[in-house]
């Protein structure tokens, strides 16, 4: 019954054309890694230069960001974003959250910025950015403000006239959320996902999924595991993100991928 209800929300979201911009496609250290002489870190191919992972999703007059890492300011400037309607968080790790203070220009123009996250993640953000969450006379006048919205399993978010479906997965022992916007789903920092949650990610035009490297990793899919998951879900196209320099050169890896599977790269835009 839950999946039948969610299917109605997925179908409702398909009515709005989406524009997807990959703000960052790198892992927690980004590429190049500071001080590294690894060949990929020294690459002159711009597709091998990756900021921390994040994506911009736009439709109609709405603009939402998934994750807000330490490169957030640079990503907003590079993508020429002047307004956001909210930030959806996948989980609380630093490479996904530490840019929250840089919402200040948006806050000064718009007021409190809506943030959407698991209850646990909202609690972690309050600990790390306490000055953002205070109110009244105690609030520092230059600090931004947010409006907290809890993301709950199997409860779609109503954003900009469409239903966005949360997809729960595991990042080793840590629960993370991915999000489905109509025919597009974004899953990062996934290691395992239940059969029930995978049902939410079927019938897609585009799936974005993480693949850290070729060697196995305890909390991330490696390339082989990501390709196996893509084969199960059978999207029309799939893009790999949250990429480490250890995966290899973009141009070389992409040539070896199956038909319909691609490496994402910073600034890549998709239209659905």
Image (cartoon, helix red, strand yellow):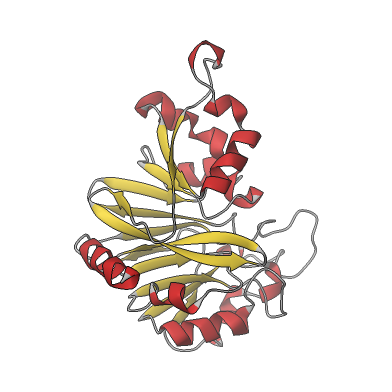
Q: Is residue 205 left or right of residue 48?
A: left
Relative image position of residue 66 (x, y in whole percent): 46, 52
Relative image position of residue 112 (x, y in whole percent): 41, 29
Relative image position of residue 225 (x, y in whole percent): 60, 82
Q: Does residue 80 appear anywhere in the picture?
A: no
> Where 215 sits versus 185, above or below?
below
Say which residue appears at 56% left-offset and 79% top-offset: 226
**Residue at the far left in the pictured view:** 15
> Where 56 sits versus 188, above or below?
above
The C terminus sits in image quarter: bottom left
> Where 272 sits versus 260, above or below?
above
Say which residue appears at 51% left-offset and 75% top-offset: 194
Say which residue appears at 64% left-offset and 51% top-offset: 93
The N terminus sits in image quarter: bottom left
Say which residue appears at 42% left-offset and 24% top-offset: 108
Relative image position of residue 257 (x, y in whole percent): 53, 86
* Residue 215, quarter of the rendered image: bottom right
Q: Is residue 172 left or right of residue 58?
A: right
Q: Which of 158 and 231 lies nearest the eye of the viewer? A: 158
* Residue 237, quarter of the rendered image: bottom left
How many tags in the picture? 0
* Residue 4, quarter of the rendered image: bottom left
Q: Does residue 203 appear anywhere in the picture?
A: yes
Q: Which of 24 and 13 lies nearest the eye of the viewer? A: 13
**Residue at the far top in the pictured view:** 137
């Amino acid at each position: 019954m839950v999946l039948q209800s969610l299917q109605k929300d997925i179908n409702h979201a398909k009515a709005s054309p989406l524009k997807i911009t990959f703000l960052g496609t790198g892992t927690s250290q980004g590429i190049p890694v500071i001080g590294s002489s690894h060949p990929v870190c020294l690459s002159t191919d711009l597709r091998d230069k990756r900021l921390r992972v994040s994506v911009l999703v736009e439709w109609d007059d709405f603009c939402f960001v998934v994750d807000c890492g330490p490169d957030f300011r640079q990503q907003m400037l590079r993508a020429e974003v002047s307004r956001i309607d909210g930030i959806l968080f996948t989980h609380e790790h630093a490479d996904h959250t530490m840019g929250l203070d840089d919402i200040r220009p948006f806050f000064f123009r718009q007021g409190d910025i809506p943030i959407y996250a698991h209850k646990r993640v909202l609690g972690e953000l309050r600990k790390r950015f306490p000055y953002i969450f205070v109110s009244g006379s105690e609030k520092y006048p230059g600090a931004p403000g947010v409006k907290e919205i809890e993301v709950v399993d199997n409860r779609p978010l109503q954003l900009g006239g469409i239903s966005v479906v949360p997809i729960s997965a595991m990042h080793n022992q840590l629960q993370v959320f991915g999000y489905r916007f109509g025919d597009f789903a974004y899953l990062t920092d996934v290691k395992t996902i239940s059969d029930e949650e995978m049902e939410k990610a079927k019938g897609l035009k585009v799936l974005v999924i993480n693949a850290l490297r070729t060697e196995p990793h305890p909390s991330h899919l490696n390339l082989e595991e990501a390709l196996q998951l893509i084969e199960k879900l059978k999207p029309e196209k799939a893009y790999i993100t949250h990429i480490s320099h250890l995966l290899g050169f973009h141009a070389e890896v992409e040539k070896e991928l199956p038909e319909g599977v691609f490496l994402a790269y910073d600034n890549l835009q998709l239209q659905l």
